[in-house]
Image (cartoon, grey):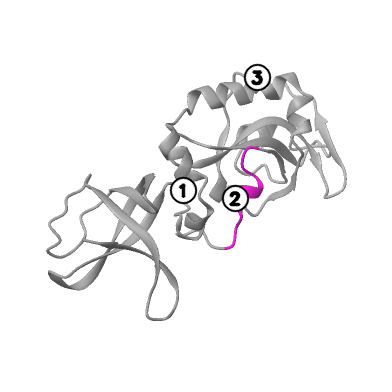
C-alpha cells in the first residue's frame, strides 16, 4: 500500500495520544473496567529498518479536549511496546507540543533509548527529510518506493520496489529490492538512480532511465 493522504510527519518525533487499546491486549485486559483509560500516549519514530512506529510511553484518557495520564504497573522504560503506524494512523487524536517531552524526564529517557537504537547515516536522513517522496512511500516500509524502470533497449517499462538510501545531484539513489521484469540487466541489490517525473497523464511518478 502506498501512503497517500495520511500525513505521518504530523506525528513523527512527537508525543501523541492514541484513543485505542485493541493493539495492546495485555494492557487492555488490565484496564478493561477503568473508565479513565481509553488509550495511550506514544512517541512516533522512524525505525532504522524503515518502518514508523508508535512507542508507548504512558496509559491514560483522552476525549479531543481533555487528556490525563493514568498510573500503571508497567515500566514503559523497560517494556517496549511498538505499534506500527499503519495500525493506528486513524486512531491518534492529538499531537502534543515538544514541551511535553522537555518537561518529562521519563519520556526523555525513553526517547533517548529509541534514538540510540535507531541511528542511521546522514545520507539516509537526507532522503527521509525529503517530502517530495512522501506520496510514493509504501506504508509497510517508509524507506521503500515503487520506481518505473525504462530503457531504450527494452520496449516496455517495469516497476520494482526500491529502498531509498541517498540523494545525488538532484536524483535519488535506491537499492533494488526485487528484479524488474524484462531484460534490464539489473539484479536485486543493485543501486539505481531515479527521479520524480510526469507521465502521459501529467501525474507525478518515479522514473529510472537505464
Label 3 – label 1 distance at C-alpha: 25 Å
Quadrant assignment for the C terminus: bottom left
Whether residue 13 is visible here, answered yes or no, is yes
- Left/right placement of residue 117 relative to residue 67 reads left
For the point 39% across and 50% down, which residue is it?
144
For the point 67% across and 38% down, which residue is it?
14
Q: Which residues are magenta?
A: 5-13
In the foreground, 1 or 104: 104
Pointer 1: residues within 10 angstroms few (<14), some, or many (20+)?
many
- Left/right placement of residue 167 relative to residue 11 reads left
Q: Which residue is tagged 3? A: 109
CB-based contact (under 8 Å), mark 3 and mark 2: no
Q: Which residue is tagged 1? A: 142
- Position above or below: 29 against 117: below
For the point 37% across and 51% down, which residue is it?
172
Q: Which residue is tagged 2? A: 8
Q: Tell which circle, 1 or 2, labels the residue nearer the N-terminal end.
A: 2
Q: Position of residue 154 (x, y in %)?
A: 14, 70
- Left/right placement of residue 77 relative to residue 149 reads right
Mark 2 secondary-structure assignment: helix
Whether residue 49 is visible here, answered yes or no, is no
Corner quadrant of residue 156? bottom left
CB-based contact (under 8 Å), mark 3 and mark 1: no
In the foreground, 30 or 58: 58
Corner quadrant of residue 166? top left
Label 3 – label 2 distance at C-alpha: 23 Å
Mark 3 secondary-structure assignment: helix
Mark 1 secondary-structure assignment: loop
Label placed on residue 21: none
Chief SS of the magenta region: loop
Amino acid at each position: 500500500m502506498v501512503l497517500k493522504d495520511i500525513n505521518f510527519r504530523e506525528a513523527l518525533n512527537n508525543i501523541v495520544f492514541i484513543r485505542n487499546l485493541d493493539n495492546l491486549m495485555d494492557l487492555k485486559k488490565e484496564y478493561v473496567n477503568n473508565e479513565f483509560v481509553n488509550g495511550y500516549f506514544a512517541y512516533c519514530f522512524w525505525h532504522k529498518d524503515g518502518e514508523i512506529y508508535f512507542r508507548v510511553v504512558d496509559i491514560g484518557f483522552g476525549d479531543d479536549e481533555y487528556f490525563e495520564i493514568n498510573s500503571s504497573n508497567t515500566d514503559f522504560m523497560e517494556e517496549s511496546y511498538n505499534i506500527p503506524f499503519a495500525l493506528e494512523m486513524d486512531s491518534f487524536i492529538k499531537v502534543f507540543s515538544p514541551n511535553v517531552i522537555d518537561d518529562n524526564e521519563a519520556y526523555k529517557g525513553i526517547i533517548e533509548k529509541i534514538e540510540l537504537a535507531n541511528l542511521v547515516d546522514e545520507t539516509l536522513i537526507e532522503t527521509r527529510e525529503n517530502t517530495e517522496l512522501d506520496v510514493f512511500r509504501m506504508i509497510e516500509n517508509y524507506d521503500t518506493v515503487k520506481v518505473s524502470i525504462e530503457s531504450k533497449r527494452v520496449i516496455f517499462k517495469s516497476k520494482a520496489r526500491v529502498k531509498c538510501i541517498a540523494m545525488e545531484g538532484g536524483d535519488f539513489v535506491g537499492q533494488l529490492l526485487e528484479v524488474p521484469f524484462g531484460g534490464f540487466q539489473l539484479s536485486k541489490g543493485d543501486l539505481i538512480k531515479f527521479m520524480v517525473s510526469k507521465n502521459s497523464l501529467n501525474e507525478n511518478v518515479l522514473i529510472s532511465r537505464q
